[in-house]
Structures are given as C-alpha cells and as structure tokens.
Amino acid sequence: MKPNRLLKWLAIAAIAFGLLTVISGGRALFGGEAARAELGNIVPFVLWFNFIAGFVYVAAGAALLLAKPGAAKLALLLAVTTVVVFLAFIAHVVSGGAYEMRTVGALAIRSLFWIVVAAFALRTAKMLSARSHAS
C-alpha cells in the first residue's frame, strides 16, 4: 500500500476514533450519576483529557486527510500528551488510586495508535518534502 493511501486510512481511523471518544466521554461526563455509576472507578483527569483530546483527534485526522502543513506535528503532540497522561495515570495507580482495568487498556491503545500515526505521518511528510526538493 502506498504511504499516502495508508496515511489516509489512518486519518479516517483518527476521525472515527475521535468521534467515538467525544461521544463516550461526553456521556460519562454529562450523562448524570447513572452513567458515571456504570463506569465504576473513573479517573477524572484521564476522562477529561480523553474527552478534550477526542476533538483534537478529529482535527488531526482531518488535517492528515487533507495533507495540511503541521498535521504530522499535531499527531506527534497527541502521541506525546497521551503518553504523559498514561504516565500520570500509572503514578495514580501506584499511589493507591482507584481505577478500572479497562482504563489501562484504553490508554495503551490510544498511546500506541497515536505513536504509530505520528511516526508514519512524520515519515511520510519527510518523504514528500524530499521529493519536492528533488524536483
């Protein structure tokens, strides 16, 4: 598969991932006590980060899809901030804070996804830049 085609599929996945994140985070944050009770031991800073980041996922996905300048750097920013939140979450867990195991999995998936997207987007941007300078 060509780099541009794969990057477009990753961009579409980022948009879908972002929309699902906003919907689920919004339900958890604004759905009332019953919605929160279903979730168990939520970690508020993780929930708020994921909800806000969901909007950025959509923007980053759209920027990647449209090959906008800075899209790869936005993907990198998402990768870095997600890993930082994951590390803060680990500190919360180690210090005895309540949590759900699904949060571990979700943060691992989000971190891995954005690391892959950022690495691929930066590599593709570098390749395209090299091609344009060679012409």
Image: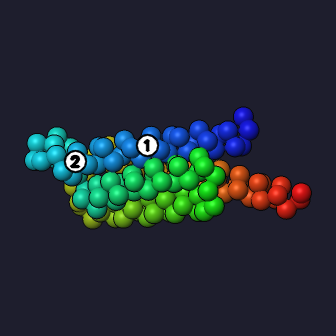
Closer to the camera in the image, 68 or 116: 68
State the image coordinates of residue 130 (x, y, percent, origin top left): 82, 59
**39 in relation to 72, above or below:** above
Q: Is residue 132 left or right of residue 83?
A: right
State the image coordinates of residue 97 (x, y, percent, origin top left): 23, 60
Closer to the camera in the image, 77 or 108: 77
At x 65%, y 39%, the residue is 6
The amino acid on which the numbered mark 2 sits, given as a three-letter code, is Ala
- Judged from the image, the secondary structure of the residue bearing numbered disc 2 is helix
* Tag 2 residue: 28
**Which comes sooner in the sequence, label 2 or label 1?**
1
At x 74%, y 38%, the residue is 2
Quadrant housing the N terminus: top right
- Judged from the image, the secondary structure of the residue bearing numbered disc 1 is helix
Q: Is residue 75 left or right of residue 90?
A: right
Residue 17's mark?
1
State the image coordinates of residue 127 (x, y, percent, origin top left): 77, 54
Q: Is residue 108 visible?
A: no
